[in-house]
């Protein structure tokens, strides 16, 4: 099928997931516009490209969002306050970004008659799983304001679809890793934290006993899912997961093998609110978006290590 090339707005496009999705959509031949306030995203994450336009602005400012929506066909909404810890400390500020900001984007998408809005939800909405793997029908019981905000976003989407027939899909991303994930950010994924410490010759830190498991998805598979979601016709919510799970100890072992290190882990007290196991069912991802994650954990880790900045080159694989 030949797909018509379209204009796509990505809010939060200068961030980790956004910048990989920008690359994916440019490769597919689309024109991409990024709306980002650069609070955690960086211009250097984005390529110079004749089909890429950057709008500096804030999803919490109505005029910024409306200006960015002009002449746009489809929108991927990723911009958010992404720290669970921040949301626990400042639920008021977090809600402004993650609820008001999202409603601004959804409302502007309606006013501009956008063909389709895809937005970032999260596995954080599930809380402590009652059974594994988690399917889209599993109970929603978030443990943090961040998780609750994502769940509220999904409910807004459901209501707006009902009221205004807006085509929207929420993607429940599981644990994402890959190049450009900032280990210094307060929400840094465990993989970027492990890599940061191992390559600096420091003991990797594990909260709890390391037996906890996660479903790790490589960011390039997330970018593929985002693109597929933008051009699908399904509405509702969909997990973006591999269907597998790996313990933190196994993960650390794999990483040490790839890096040729053998540092002893430092075990710290388990963090309140951390769940023991997480694993998503990717069946709907296959059925709705025709997508099977391509990247094995080993291949993804290799790619991540190869993409690291040159200051760490002495440890590169
Ligand atoms: N990384 C993960 O493992 C993960 C898992 C589940 C869900 N998510 C969700 O995916 C989305 C992207 O996350 P990420 O990991 O790429 O984070 P990120 O911090 O790298 O990207 C977020 C981007 O949004 C921008 N931004 C933040 N607030 C903004 C505002 N008010 N106006 C405009 N731009 C703003 C930031 O500058 C940044 O470029 C978020 O909605 C996040 O909640 C991420």
Image (cartoon, rainbow, N blue to C red):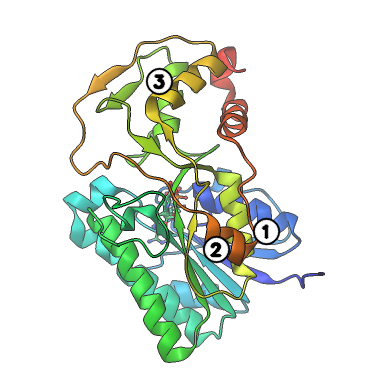
**Can see residue 117?**
yes
Q: Residue at x 26, y 57 (%)?
A: 142
Q: Nearer the viewer, residue 208 or 68?
A: 208
- Asked if labels 1 and 3 touch by Cβ distance under 8 angstroms, the answer is no
- What residue is shown with label 3? 197
Query: Which residue in the protein does label 1 denote?
Result: 25
Asked if the residue at tag 2 contacts the one at tag 1, i.e. Cβ–Cβ closer than 8 Å, the answer is yes
Which residue is tagged 2? 10
Considering the image in quadrants, where does the C terminus appear?
A: top right
Instruction: Report which quarter residue 194 is drawn in.
Output: top left
Q: Is residue 43 above or below residue 103?
A: above
Question: From this viewpoint, is residue 55 visible?
Answer: no
- Dividing the image into 4 quarters, which one contains the N terminus? bottom right
Q: Residue furthest bottom?
A: 163
**What separation in Å lies between label 3 and label 1 (alpha carbons)?**
33 Å
Q: Is mark 2 within 8 Å of ligand 1?
A: no
* In the image, the residue with mark 3 has its CB under 8 Å from the nearest atom of ligand 1: no
Numbered label tally: 3
Report whether 145 appears left or right of 310: left
* Other residues around mark 3 within 10 Å, as few (<14) / some (14–19) / many (≥20): some
């Amino acid at each position: 099928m030949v797909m018509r090339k379209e204009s796509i707005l990505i809010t939060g496009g200068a961030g980790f997931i956004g910048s990989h999705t920008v690359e994916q959509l440019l490769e597919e031949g689309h024109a991409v516009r990024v709306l980002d306030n650069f609070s955690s995203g960086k211009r250097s994450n984005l390529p110079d490209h004749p089909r890429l336009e950057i709008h500096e602005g804030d999803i919490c400012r109505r005029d910024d969002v409306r200006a960015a929506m002009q002449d746009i066909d489809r929108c991927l909404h990723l911009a958010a306050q992404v720290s669970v810890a921040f949301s626990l400390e400042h639920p008021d500020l977090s809600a402004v970004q993650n609820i008001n900001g999202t409603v601004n984007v959804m409302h502007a998408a309606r006013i501009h008659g956008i063909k389709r809005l895809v937005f970032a939800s999260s596995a954080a909405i599930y809380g402590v799983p009652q059974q594994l793997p988690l399917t889209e029908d599993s109970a929603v019981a978030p443990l943090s304001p961040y998780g609750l905000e994502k769940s509220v976003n999904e409910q807004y989407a459901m209501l707006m679809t009902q009221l205004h027939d807006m085509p929207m899909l929420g993607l429940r991303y599981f644990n994402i890793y890959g190049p450009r994930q900032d280990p210094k950010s307060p929400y840094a994924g465990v993989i970027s934290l492990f890599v940061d410490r191992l390559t600096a010759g420091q003991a990797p830190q594990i909260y709890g006993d390391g037996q906890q498991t996660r479903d790790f998805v490589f960011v390039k598979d997330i970018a593929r899912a985002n693109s597929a979601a933008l051009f699908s016709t399904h509405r509702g919510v969909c997990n973006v997961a591999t269907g597998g799970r790996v313990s933190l100890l196994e993960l650390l072992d794999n990483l040490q093998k790839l890096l040729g290190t053998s540092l002893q882990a430092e075990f710290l007290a388990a963090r309140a609110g951390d769940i023991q196991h997480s694993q998503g069912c990717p069946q709907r991802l296959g059925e709705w978006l025709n997508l099977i994650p391509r990247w094995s954990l080993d291949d993804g880790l290799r790619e991540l290590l190869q993409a690291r900045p040159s200051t760490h080159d002495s440890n590169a694989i």
